[in-house]
Image: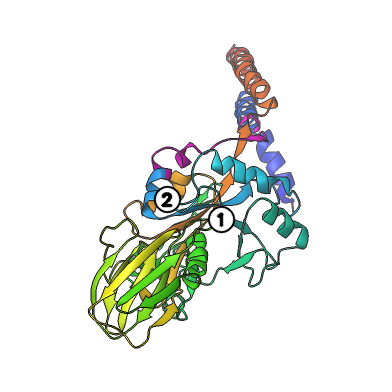
Amino acid sequence: MLSRADQDLMTHSQHPPHVRRRGLTGLLMVALLASATTAPSVVGEWEDDSWLSNIIGPERLANGDEFGCHGYEGVQTTEEHWVIGACRDYLMGLANASRWGSHPISFGIPGEEVDLATAAALVDSGFEIVGDLQSQAPAGLTAMYRNGGSLEQGVADTELLGSADEHSLVSIWWRARIDDLRLREDKQVISWLEEQEVWLTTWGEWHHHRLSGSEVAVEMDGSTITATLTSHASWDVPGTVSLQFDPAVVRVISSSGSEFAQIAPEQRKLEVGWRATTEGMILTIAPGDSVTVQLDGESESILTTPLATFNDFHHAVTVIGHHTTNLFQWSSDFQESPLVFTWLIERPAEVEMSWALPIIALAVLIAVPVSVRYFVRKDRKNLSEESG
């Protein structure tokens, strides 16, 4: 009984020499081409994502999005702290972080904890928020926890998104690509989410809106209410308070003397203004502004309650764009969507051509024709001798 190897050898030896040589020629060509196309590339410096400053970036800022940081592609932030300040400078050189502030304050750190050295580097670079699996953060930082699943097809969970706690922020994960693999979004879940009556916001906006709301000072003098919010050292994000009183509102005037804008009940993106309620009013005021509310009579008392969510929505939602190395690719499926994103920008690595690649390619160009010509001549000679 012959082994498989012996059978293959016997079969191979039965072919004429010129057939075997042609097979060898083909194998040689395949090997050379394969070596040229699979030669390893070398990661060198980093490049810029021009979409941050051109077209897409300004459009996303106008939509209410935020640009935070996720470091440099291929570098572990917790091991190389220099990328924290470098990512901040890279982003600020291309775009504002938000419509409320120019400098980025949100940073994406993997893992469930942030070590003290990394936390100190983040604070020193002006960051205030860290996410996305940390339920707690060291002093000086606020943790934002990923609690809303993902928009990736087959992974999104509408039950999870629909069971959010009152006055909470839901952070939903999104990444367009992992290496060369493109992730598909769940269009059905996105359509469902776009119709929900929730506040569409970002990490930084949510964080500073809560701070601003707790700092609104309210005074009452007869039939006049005055609400004031001092300016912030960081982002100038408006704050919202609920005011409860008995008389009806006659007029609301801003510090400039103009009529203060009214907010529609369905408005889902943060803006300054007010709207009447059955118990009084909801007021959203910008830092550095003062608003005067004139009533049609005196009120015995006034109750002021800071609101965590804008327009008194049940909860808020943001989508976190992780490892955003190409803003166009990450946002292309959401150009017509009202959803608001917190983009964690990661400076993309520049892939340099391997020095060996041109040499291998040149070798292929030379070796393949020479080898083919050689074997063709040999085959012709053998065929001539066999026929002669």
Is residue 42 in the magenta section? yes
Q: Which residues are magenta?
A: 35-57
Judge depth for marks 1 and 2 and give the one in front: 1
Q: Residue at x 70, y 52 (%)?
A: 124
Q: Amino acid at mark 1?
A: Ala
Q: Position of residue 234 (x, y in %)?
A: 55, 55
Observer-nearest residue: 171 or 120? 120
Judge whether 351 appears above or below 197 on screen: above
Observer-nearest residue: 191 or 138? 138
Q: How many marks?
A: 2
Q: Position of residue 181 (x, y in %)?
A: 52, 50
- Kindly report the distance in space between the C-alpha atoms of the residues bearing marks 1 and 2: 31 Å
Q: Residue 313: in sight, yes or no?
A: no
Q: Is residue 17 left or right of residue 263?
A: right
- For the N terminus, the image quarter is bottom right
Q: Residues within 10 Å of mark 1 (few under 14, many from 20)?
A: few
Q: Position of residue 31 (x, y in %)?
A: 65, 31
Q: Which residue is mark 2?
A: 331
Q: Amino acid at mark 2?
A: Ser
Q: Position of residue 8 (x, y in %)?
A: 68, 43
Q: Which residue is mark 1?
A: 233
Judge whether 16 appears above or below 370 on screen: below
Q: Is residue 30 left or right of residue 51?
A: right
Q: Residue at x 32, y 84 (%)?
A: 245
Q: Give the secondary structure at mark 2.
A: helix
Q: Residue 12: in sight, yes or no?
A: yes
In the figure, residue 350 lies in which quadrant?
Answer: top right
Instruction: Give whichever of discs 1 and 2 has the lower sequence position.
Output: 1
- For the C terminus, the image quarter is top right
